[in-house]
Amino acid sequence: MPKTPGPPHLGLSRRSLLGTSGAVGAGLGLAGSADAQQTGPELAAFNTAQITLNVNGKRRTLNVEPRTTLVEALRDDMGLTGTKIGCNQGQCGACTVLLNGRRMNSCLILAITADGAEVVTIEGLADPAGRLHPMQEAFAEHDAFQCGYCTPGQILSAIGCIDEGHAKSAAEIREYMSGNLCRCGAYPNIVAAIESVRDGQEG
Amino acid sequence: MAQTLNTAVSRTDAPRKVTGTATYAADVIPAGMLHGALATSSIAVGTLTGLDTSAAEAEPGVVAVYTHENLPDYKSVKGFYAGGPGSASFWPMEGTEIKYAGQPIAYVVAETAAAARRGAQLITADYDSRPADVHMDPADSFVIGATGDSKGMVATKGDVPKGLAEAAQTLDVEYTTPFQHHNPMEMFASTAEWRGDRLTVWMPSQSVRTLRLGIAKAFGLPETSVRVISPFVGGAFGSKAGITPYAMLTIAAAKAVGAPVRLIVTRPQMYTVATFRPESVQRFRLGADETGKLTAFEHIEIAQTSQFDVVTNPGTHITRAMYASPNIHTEQRVARSDTNTGGFMRAPNEMQTFFGLEQAMDELAHKLGIDPVEMRRVNDTDRHPVEDVPFSSRSLMECYDSVSDTFGWADRTAEVGSMTDGDWLVGYGCATATYPTNILASNARVRMRGTGHAYIELAAHDVGTGSYTIFAQIAAARLGLPVEACDVVMGHGDMPVAPLAGGSGTAASAGSAVHDACLRIGRLVAAEVSRQPEGPLAGVSADRITLEDGVLRGPDGHSQSLVEALASTATTEVEAVGEFRHPALTDKLIRATFSGGYGTAGPVTPECAMFAFGAEMAEVHINRWTHEIRVPRAHGAFAAGTILNRKTAHSQLMGGMVWGIGSALHEVTEVDKPRARYLNANIAEYLVPVNADIREIRVEMLEERDDYVNPLGVKGIGELGIVGTAAAIANAVHHATGRRLRHLPIRMSDLV
């Protein structure tokens, strides 16, 4: 059993967060709201930097700690939780986004180094009318996932794979999609989905 | 009405999963949420003598650091194998005792995830360390539980030494399988929010009821004050069933700090704060006559367990059900070592035991000069070899015949090393797959409206298995609605009871409860319309009205669609709670499931043995010079009763076979044995199959009818695909090279 509860080791010298429990949330609560709002928490005692990103076509300005990764900025500061964290160390590809058009592991990128960049996440793929991107449709049709957790990263990686010209054959797709792990083992269906989109684009 | 069962239906949750709007536990961000991080022990066994948290506390952004000294008290719960809701019976941070490496010793709460992580890194600990050990010495192993009865861990029939003496050929071999970790793509996460004495916990779960019950007990709350929410689970495979320390600590930390706290466990920490597949030794002694018929069958399994729980995944219960033999002896043993408690990982009784059994059958067939498929055929049986009850259905040889056709088994030349393709040695191997059919009590609520919509609610889970879709299909078929008009809501602890998503039992058990709820709706609506003054069924005795595919039918040819009938009633809405209570379910078993446990009546009841079967074949290519091992194709044919959804079922079986390839060639948690620490606790060095590892996977699902298992005739397919794959690959490696590899994984270095 733990001993009798004592007071936590509070960092009272810093911002008195406990008394103002809405403070962080006030920032987070803006997630998904209008363009160009300041969406980062006010972190007075931290060294923070203001950055501007173009995320899914919208300009977003936020304050981030230098150690905040892009995926954490997307998820925790902007509320774009479609991008998933699968390992936080660049091993699994679940956090793949398109950064200036290239597929990248967003857990390996510090948010401040992405200042000024264009970022496309899974939330930005459907057109303004809500019509799904062909890759999203193909993944659904081919059952290219089971649990769905790696799926946003797989879909962005798949779009990148075709754009790079690395989808010429099933073998090439398998090789160039090997940075995106799928523990459910949907690989053959992922390859089929990508081939169908590639063929659709060619046609 | 188009047929909705046994067809290929796209997942109903696919639109959410491809748009990033499916909410997994860590996607919920309550207002004011803080971030947690764990510091864990660097030693495996000893006593914590000092813990310096000052640097962590001084770190900007860190709000609080909790240790065993200041964490709010909660009551421990027992581990799963001791009949409790926990992942293990030992709870960290209750004192200074260290029982496994990577044991949580401190919990940091901070304003950002980065600050929490940094805070955890800054904590230093001093220990009084004692020797630790991870070993599998048969001399230190012991038999679990009682002997003699059918649930017992030792079974004996006839006289194995006599059977061995009578045999034309015998085999006495040992196989070993390693520690493996589930590694779901979704990291373990838990978010806890207290509002007064009401608690909400978001965490990925295979059993929301188990969690709710255990958390309520631990924190002294009525169950109704605890909400456990888990609508989407990013893969589980057995790792997200019981309450884990990371969840309990997060709840306690949130209580102490007075704000919601979210913890995302790091990938390396995922290896020690939850369960895993224990390592094992599989010993087989087999004897057979000249025709291949077994004269003796002995299997002794020794599986690893912790110092504080007895992990019981009785694989010998499954192997002894496979083949006829007059003389049988099986024994289930465990050996303790200094790790956290293991648990169930996809096919927990079957993966490792069938790596042994199915290679042993291949070895014996080779000694006798018999085709491996024929070896299985001569030993096929329609009665359970030990329990002497019939199988409710058993299509093992139909599976072999089907897969032999698609794979081209007839092209195999028997001689070792006789097949080549340029610089590649080619091998063909086969193995049996099976999975026991579990029968568990379940409820489900269905509400139907006269507008033609239905809502299905139950505390079941879709861990990627397709449950959302198949429950909608079942309701659609029974109620006569389109699948998309049936809305399924799951993953909340306060919904009608459904069993833990494990043992491949959800479709069979919870699905049968959905089916029953729909039939009850039919009866309720029939009673209403029979009382009406006019209408096609007015005045017909309600008990003579039946519901068939969404149509109410009276005895004299009068009928009315259920939707129309419902629309004509005053309420235009009807609700029913369905129940699945198989006759083999005892009160004790029902009570176990309803109190968060796993009360299965399978796979052997007094009347029947219930198993799904399959046959798998693998082609292996081994480079003559580099010894690189490739699996260009793997085929499986499976018979598992009714297939509800041919698309999601195909994915399940295919994914299982991918797991089997992983077990065969990639997966192992390496252990620094003298220090009892894992060496490759990350998802780059713990290899799982990547896209380039997987080439052709072919899955055939055979028609099979089974009226005994449940009203839907469903046996369950979530784990079947993995069983046998590793043995089929090992047998193919032998066929290609003549090398018998009796351990997993099989690597290039084994072939040098």
Image: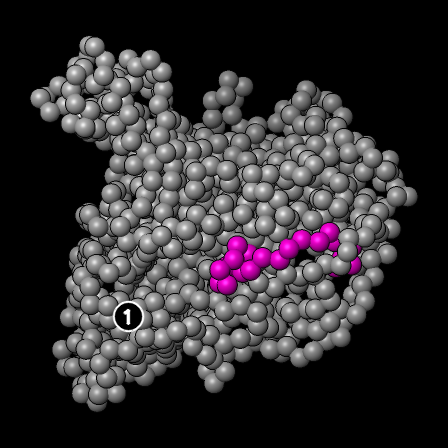
Chain part drawn in magenta: B67-86
Q: Is residue B364 visible?
A: no
Quarter in which the C terminus of chain B is drawn: bottom left
In the picture, measured across the screen, residue A21 lies left or right of residue B741, that is right
Q: Residue furthest bottom?
A: B165
Front position in the image: B686 or B626:
B686
**Residue under label 1:** B320
Residue drawn where x is 72% and y is 76% of the image: B129
Please tell me in which quadrant of the rendered image residue B292 appears.
bottom left
Can residue B70 be found in the magenta stretch?
A: yes
Q: Is residue B28 visible?
A: yes
Q: Position of residue B57 (x, y in %)?
A: 84, 51
Residue drawn where x is 87% and y is 51% of the image: B58
Residue drawn where x is 48% and y is 32% of the image: B16
Q: Position of residue B389 (x, y in %)?
A: 20, 64
- Vertical position of residue B352 compared to residue A172: above or below: below
Q: Chain of mark 1?
A: B
Q: Residues within 10 Å of mark 1 (few under 14, many from 20)?
A: many
Can residue A25 be found in the magenta stretch?
A: no
* Numbered disc 1: secondary structure: loop
The three-letter code of the residue at mark 1 reads Arg
- Vertical position of residue B689 compared to residue B415: above or below: above
Quarter in which the N terminus of chain B is drawn: top left
- Vertical position of residue B506 compared to residue B430: above or below: above
Please tell me in which quadrant of the rendered image residue B677 appears.
bottom right
Q: Residue furthest top?
A: B534
Q: Main secondary structure of the magenta part?
A: loop
Q: Residue furthest left?
A: B556
Residue drawn where x is 61% and y is 36% of the image: B28
Q: Position of residue B608 (x, y in %)?
A: 22, 59
In the picture, measured across the screen, residue B354 lies left or right of residue B276, that is left
